Image (cartoon, coloured by chain):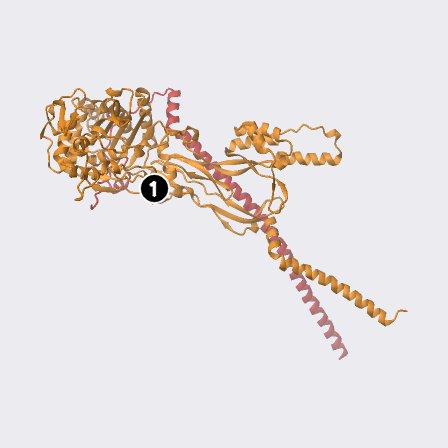
Chain colours: A orange, B red
Amino acid sequence: MKSRAQLVYRALVLLALVLLAFAGLGFRLVDLQVWRHDELSARAEANTQRRFWQTARRGDILDANGNLLATSVPAETVCADPFLINGQQSLVARTIAPLLQMDENEVFQRLQPRLYKNSKGEVCTNRYVVLQRKVPEDAWLKIRAAMTNLSVAVDESRMTKAERKEFRNFVFCLKQYSVFAEPDELRVYPNGALAAHVLGFVGTRQTNNTSELFGYDGIERFFDSKLSGASGWRVTGVDSHKHELVQLRDQDVGARDGLSVQLTIDIAIQHIVEEALANAYREHSPQGISAIVLRPKTGEILAMSSLPNFDPNNLQTITTNNEANVCISRLYEPGSTFKTIVISGALNEHIVSLNDTVFCENGAFHYGGIVLHDAEHDHFGNLTVQQVLQKSSNIGASKIGIKMGPEKLYDYMTDFGLGEFTGIPLPGEVSAHQFVRPPRDANGKPIWGKYSIAQIPMGQGVAVTRLQIAMAVAAIANGGVLMRPMLVKSLRDSDGNVVEKYEPQAVRRVITPETAHEMVEALKTVVTPDGTAPKAALTNYTVAGKTGTAQKVVNGTYANDKFVVTFIGFFPADNPELLIAVVMDAPKEGGHAFGGALCGPVFHEIAERCASYLNIPPDNLPKQETMQVAGNAQ
Amino acid sequence: MAKNKKSQAASIRFGPALAASFVCLVIAGAAVGYVWQKGQVIQLGKQYRIAESKLAQLRDDNESMAKTLADMKSPLRLDQRVQELRLGLIPARPSQVFRMPEPMTQENNNLPRQFAARPNQETTQ
């Protein structure tokens, strides 16, 4: 029989062992829960928690009537896991390359597994590769179907049971998981190239592991911050199949969709303008042609277009030749359209009146050692100021400019908005500040070149943008008040509620209403048979306008065979609803190109169709038609 | 006395048993309730996720359909269709349009006009 001491000893040993075991467990517990707490909790979180980024939907761009000009539609970024493809790269590339509209070899190369060392120094295979972004949903569904129907030709009869099981598992993963999609967004312009220079286009950048659209040009760029919205995120738990467990959602900050920008552009008028420009482009083969349609009373731009243009749906159509919006970013010498500014100023200052006579030197005016000429076949003697405008006499305008003096002329040029930004909400506008603002002497007086005061009044030696000169003429049409060009009507949220509304803005009064009225009366004569633009006249509306034919500067000198021709007109002349400015750059007619002859018919075509579309009441119905209307009424 | 003692003891033993049973029931009920509620949370979570994905799908469909509608309303496409169908549509001449005078009521004054007719706005400059 064992002694009591032995029993006690054994009990103590057992107790010690148990205590040791508990101590070990306690140590492990402290190790896991205290010392390695941060590391292990991070690993646990990484296993069960996921952060999902929620990209905001880019806002739409709408026309004045709410028609879509640019919108975002859901698309997919197609990705692949090279690890799961494991030796079947060729088969997968052959299956999906045509659906992705990619070269098969390129897809094959991207599917190749790449080895790299992770942060712990372990060699790993890459498990994520982007094959194509912005894939339309229907194309992705075809890819999905093609992958599900993939057939891997292997003889299973020679495999063991375990090998067969492993192979089938591999094929299942290959079909189901090796090619997958992530949500993406595709920017679509439903009207193709229509208003492309106004709308601009978008590019893609990577943020938070997602691709995001950003404005590259046009409205897309100017209003990028409003259109983009703000991304959201969600931190949540996932199960072993990586499916989200909603009850474990932690942070959930929803994306705020971008605002929609509603423009003053009218899609129908824009189409009318682009069609008319395309016809003229085919007929006269100019280097470029542009047109602006606006409401003089408000400054709202209803259409702005230039050719050649591009299709923002296909960025490969964009070249340095067609990328720029020439209406705001290219300077040109306005030619005789500039005479409207000189004569407006002279009338406003009472330096001349419309009935005053100016001797036009029979076509050759010697001034400061140079000879100024009127147009090729014009040898005018005495003309009234009104006739100077009607017949577009260079010499007459120069003499009025000289009488006015450089300081006053300069003041009116700047008051009409030349040499300053118009404030149109588009990127890339130039002001032509350096071409209008002359250097000043010590007394602050402008110092122009020796011939400037004779040349500038006829529109030579001064540079403007197409929009600046259009707005200046619009000021005359608007009773002498210069308006700020208005391109954006409102900003709307995703539910269509107006967040911000833009109103027409008057910049300043430039001339008195009486002077503006006199100018309108004078400009009406331009489209008469004795004027320079009879082809611009409309059947049922009175038109007021001005032509311009300016030599282009080539290699520092004025070329005799390259001209920029212009017609700017508005109607109904006494209560103008629309102003249309058409500019053609270097048409094939060369030295025989005139603003009235080439741009007048374009104006006519646009004006007739716009008047019909906008249902503008005619102010000049022929008698026969008036009687017919009266008869119908009875 | 003895009878009284006996009956007292019996009543004391029955009370705690009843109380213990009640406590056990409450605990068991709470446990079952907790598990049921957890199950409900999981079920609702699944339903919520399905509803969310359905909503997202509907939004996507809506966007796609808006794009299709915009395609169909595009003036380019409409012009093309008019030519294809040889409808011979041309704009009405101004003489073909007869305008009825609108009675000037307060309501009409508030309606937006079809063409620009904003009053001139002058600055103080």
User: Tag 1's secondary structure?
Assistant: strand
Looking at this view, name the residue that lies furthest to the right: A1
| Residue A320 in which image quadrant | top left
Quarter of the picture containing the N terminus of chain A is bottom right
Viewer can see residue B96:
no
Q: Nearer the viewer, residue A280 or A417?
A: A417
Q: Nearer the viewer, residue A377 or B102?
A: A377
Q: Residues within 10 Å of mark 1 (few under 14, many from 20)?
A: many
Q: Quadrant of residue B9?
A: bottom right
How far across and down, in percent of the image, does residue B88 sit?
34, 20
Q: Position of residue A33 (x, y in %)?
A: 63, 59
Location of residue A349 in the rendering, given as x and y in whole percent from the top left corner: 12, 38
Q: Where does residue A243 sit, x and y in percent of width and height?
A: 59, 44
Quadrant where the C terminus of chain A is found in the figure: top left
Of A269 and B46, the residue lying toward us: A269
Query: What amino acid type should be assigned to the residue bearing mark 1?
Result: Ser
Residue at image mark 1: A490
Q: Is residue A31 visible?
A: yes
B6 sits left or right of A71 in the view: right
Q: Is residue A111 left or right of residue A616?
A: right
Residue occupying image coordinates x 69% and y 34%: A167
Q: Chain of mark 1?
A: A
